[in-house]
Image (spheres, rainbow, N blue to C red):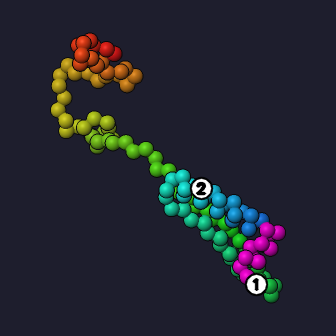
Amino acid sequence: MLLSELLITQDRGAIDREAGAALTEVAGAVDALDRAGSLTVELKLSKQAGRIVVVANVKPKAPIAPSAAALYFVGKDGLQKDDPKQLTLEGMRRLPEDEAPRTVNADTGEVTG
């Protein structure tokens, strides 16, 4: 028996259809992310009452997009955004996250923001 015949006849073709759908999914992810993926069709064979039992499993491994990176420093209380080795100036304050910085128009000298 050819492997292709086994895949087509196993579980009335369900494994062949599942592998085909997984192949399409992995190929699409490889194309979109430009990263490698894989598809494994695992066949487990055992003997039972004088017959060979075949159990098939489809294992797609599509690439995933990398998560965004962030930089931190190690301080006395663990990770933190500020560099603990950096000197601070008295009286300086942080700009709130939701407040836009002010800018100066180079032509007119007008402060905006």
Q: Toward which corner of the image does residue 106 lie, by quadrant?
A: top left
How packed mark 2 is, by other alpha carbons closer than 10 Å (few <14, some 14-19, many 20 or more), is some
Numbered disc total: 2
What's the amino acid at mark 1?
Met
What's the amino acid at mark 2?
Gly
Q: CA distance from mark 1 to mark 2?
A: 31 Å
Q: Is residue 111 left or right of residue 60?
A: left
- Say which element carries label 2: helix
Q: Is residue 26 visible?
A: yes
Q: Which mark identifies residue 1?
A: 1
Residue underneath mark 2: 28
Q: Identify the residue shown where x is 31% and y is 14%.
A: 112
Q: Identify the residue shown where x is 54% and y is 62%.
A: 37
Q: Which residue range is magenta in the image?
A: 1-13
Q: Is residue 45 left or right of residue 70?
A: right
Q: What secondary structure is the magenta-colored segment mainly?
A: helix
Q: Nearer the viewer, residue 68 or 2?
A: 2
Query: Does 24 sit above or below residue 56?
Result: above
Query: Does 38 sit above or below residue 108?
Result: below
Pinpoint residue 109: horizontal percent, then vertical percent: 23, 13
Q: Nearer the viewer, residue 91 or 41?
A: 41
Q: Is residue 64 visible?
A: no
Pinpoint residue 108: horizontal percent, then vertical percent: 24, 12
Pinpoint residue 53: horizontal percent, then vertical percent: 76, 79
Query: Does 63 sit above or below residue 78?
Result: below
Position of the C terminus, as image quadrant, is top left
